[in-house]
Amino acid sequence: MRRACTAASASRPWATTSSNDGTSVTPELSGIFSNTFANNTIGIAVSASYQDREASFNQAATTSGWRGAYLGSANDWGTLPQNDPQATNRPGPNDVYSPPQNLNYSLNNIKRERINGQAVLQWEPVSNLRATVDYTYSENRIRTDRSELSVWFNFGDVTSSWTDGPVVGPIIYSEEFGPGKDLSFGGAQFASINVNESTGFNLAWSPTDRLDLELDIHSSSAESRPDSIYGSNSVIGMASFDLARQTIDFSHDLPVLNIELAGGGANINPALATTTGTSFRSSYMRTEIDQIRLDGSYALDLGFVKSVDFGVTHTENNVRSAFAVAQRDTWGGAGPPSDVPDDIFHVVSLGDVFDQIDGGNSSSMAPMTLAFDFDRAAQLIDTLYNACGGDGICRTDNYTTDRRTTEESTSAFFQINNEFSIGSMPANLIVGARYEETEITSQALVPVPTGTQWVANNEFGIIFGPNQDFTELTGSYDYFLPSIDFDVSVTDDIILRASYSKTITRPGYDSIQGGQTVNGLFRIDGGNGSQGNPGLLPYESANYDLTAEWYYDEASYFAAGYFRKDVQNFIGTSVIDVPAFNLPTPYGGPRYNAAVAALGGSTDATAIRNYILTNYPDSSDVTGTDSNGNLVGNIFGIPGEDPVLNFRVSVPVNQQEASVDGFEVAWQHMFGDSGFGGIVNYTIVQGDVEFDNTQPASVTQFALVGLSNSANVVAFYDKNGIQARIAYNWRDEFLASTIDPSGTPNNPVYVEPFGQIDLSASYDITEALTVLFEGINVTDEINRSHGRHQNQAEFVTQTGARYAVGLRYSF
């Protein structure tokens, strides 16, 4: 038995995080104890840690995506009118452009509490037999409180200016409204607890000098559930219905929002604010993995063949994801502004929270938003509107979407390890193969839509009825996966390596889950939905690697390599247009057309809704009036009379094959015995399938995501009890997704180049006492992503720098 050290340690660092609420001081404690007993035949180790963290990030985002990606010749809802006199440098007929659907500013405060613990018991009664039992527990509670300011475009009276083509980006995009347009400043709370447990048993036995056997049995689970009476993802909408014009300047890194209110100016009046819709969502996820593995190694004395390795494994994964929502679609206003006390709000300066981003200090930016206490607002709407049933428990645990997937895999491998010489050069050759077969069973319980309702100017909602029974889909696949590795020591300092292998990467569980679901809200042009595909095949990759390594001095080396991966069965998204569930939509039906005719051809949504709510009471439900005297209520779709609603349903599919190749360079150098050293790494990677930004969103495309060059440079000192390190980590721009945040396919998202500087240092005051320091992103760099054009901002995030200081004591 390997003797464990008799030791224990504890540390208490204080992490100082850039925060919207000011500087936070948060603790961390950790400790470890290990020892051996009974003449070193029994050993134990126990470790535990506790961490409390606070952080903030502020973000601008077009969370509802960008409308399509249209050719300048297109004529659709959201496109610019042909010969538009209010468009400067309007996109040409063959240019591709995208109007913005919304803009959202969010302020996010994060609190995280983490507990980790592990216990290990080991018994070695004789030298050739060792048994180990281990248990690991981790718990992570995360809560994020968010305040938002957002605007939505209806594509009415639009003034705009654009860059040159062929891929066109907006410079200015502005829309003017009549009275009653909402300016939203909602609040959200995300709260979840994640618990992981793992129990393992390992038995290592060497029955002879040549044979080693190892049995490993392992069971683990990971569970995520709501950690709040509001659920895991909760939103309370607030708005003032006095927005007259909204303008966004996209020429900066930060999209700059300018607003004009009906009463003049841009200072939001709390007295005009009212609560709108609410959504209290709960998500439950659990994964259980049970695995048994038997491995062996047999040493041979055959000259060329030195040993063989072999083994079999059986793994069963059970994955469940369930969702519930308690939603009130009163987005047009739940009641008059007088229902909401003014002192529930406090003012936040937008220029202050985006001060590190280009555009954040613009004089034209909206000067403020209103934030509010989420708990107080929830109590208020429960008292006023019975939003939580009157008991303050706003969430529901009645999971209307419940997906369960079982994945069983059995595999076996065999490997031959060879040692020989090429002339005077020692060489190794490892040849092996693995066979795997997998069976997938996916069950799904999803909510059944029974109707639709028009709840606000451009807010349409799905009405859900009783759940359908569980449906079951299956899939299976098997693979033979060979591998070969070779290395030769050309000199004592230089090693050359070459390898080939075939590997598979399984689809994500979100892709192989069954069941078709549709989003609860849809728009004038239809709705979105998704469904899984248990029949997906895994990624299959043929991998080639060549590497040269030169160890020219103690702790100093230089290495360069080439790699290539030929991948089949890439998983992409296919979009099908289907009249899912044959739901009627009020938009474009007889009542809608009668309203347009009565209004002289006007398509003003407020006027049309007032007309229908007044003249068709049998198919609508009036709930009141807003602050401008407009009727508030729901207009229901009529089966057999109104047009059938179309859904764009996203389905994961195996698409085509592609290749990725690149070069890697690594260099580490120590400057003698000075304690100073440096590390440089650089990776160049490229693929043979790229996204074509000049094609409109109507053209389905496949592209490789996540590919980019990367580098890091590290300088360090390690001597005389002092350790210091400064690192610069950089990654070039890459395509993150071909689906935008709203779920619209063929709308790419690119993450822009990002680099940050991190610091760390420690000093051993004594052999037992060490002081620690850490700084992350010390220059306060921002993260930014965009669509086809750089002006099409998707996410712009300011996180701030984070620092930690602490002590570690061992005894």
Image (spheres, grey):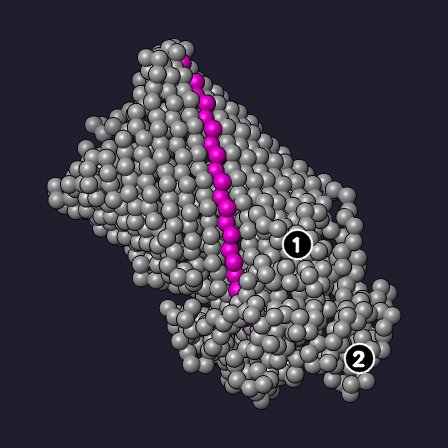
Judged left or right of residue 606, residue 431 is left
Mark 2 or mark 1, which is nearer to you? 1
Q: Considering only order in the chain, which callout, 1 or 2, is on the residue closer to the N terminus?
A: 1
Residue 120 image offset from top left, x and y in percent? 42, 25
Q: Where does label 2 land, which residue?
A: 611
Which sits in the foreground, 562 or 341? Answer: 341
Along the viewing direction, whichever of 84 and 166 lies nearer the viewer: 84
Say whether residue 610 is left or right of residue 212: right
Q: What residue did someone put label 1 on? A: 392
Which of the 4 quarters of the picture holds residue 23? bottom left
Q: Give the range drawn in magenta.
A: 129-150
Q: Which amino acid does label 1 sit on?
A: Gly
Report, in whole angstroms, how far the alpha carbon at label 2 lies from the one at label 1: 37 Å
Q: Where is residue 633 in the image (x, y as percent from the top left)?
A: 76, 71
Q: Is mark 1 on a helix, strand or loop?
A: loop
Q: Quadrant of the N terminus?
A: top left
In this image, 201 relative to 546: left or right? Answer: right
**Residue at left offset 35%, top offset 59%:** 801
